[in-house]
Amino acid sequence: MTEPEQSSIWKRSRELDRDRRKKTQELMDEYDRNVYYPAKKALQDECEKGRGHHGGKYHDNGLGWHWFYCQSCGARYDVQQHTKFTVEDDEDE
Ligand SMILES: [Zn+2]
């Protein structure tokens, strides 16, 4: 198989994946807005008011903020800003 054919197949494969993601999002949009997100939010509120968010993975967004994801409900918690970027810092880069 030649390089151009491989490249074309790679491209078409990515396009199929992209189109499927887009279609999935369209099909799930109403359910997510009316069912999933409200239910998830209620569950995360219940977790916070009960035992409280705990454990889970640490995340640093690379923009000066870090937090944990609760191992029970998946909510972000203990969100903290550890670096304050100023206009001067941005101009230096
Ligand atoms: Zn939680």
Image: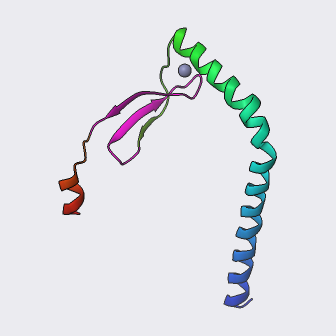
The segment highlighted magenta reads: 61-82
Q: Residue at x 70, y 23 (%)?
A: 39
Residue 47 lies, with reference to residue 37, above or below; the image says above
Q: Quadrant of the C terminus?
A: bottom left
Location of residue 67 by image quarter: top left
Farthest top residue in view = 50
Task: Check the image and report above or below for 45 versus 9.
Answer: above
In terms of depth relative to the viewer, which is nearer, 80 or 60? Answer: 80
Query: Per the image, is 53 magenta?
Result: no
Q: How is the image coloured?
A: rainbow
Horizontal and vertical percent position of residue 10: 70, 75
Residue 49 in the image: state x and y as whole percent. Answer: 53, 10
> Is residue 67 one of those drawn in magenta?
yes
Which of 32 and 12 lies nearest the eye of the viewer?
A: 32
Is 74 displayed left or right of 62 in the figure?
Answer: right
* Image quarter (top left, top right, bottom left or bottom right) of the N terminus: bottom right
Q: Answer with the quarter of the image where residue 34 lies.
A: top right
Residue 18 image point, x, y percent: 71, 62
What residue lies at 73% left-to-right and 36% top-to-bottom? 32
Image quadrant, ligand 1? top right
Q: Residue 17: horizontal and vertical position, in percent?
A: 74, 62
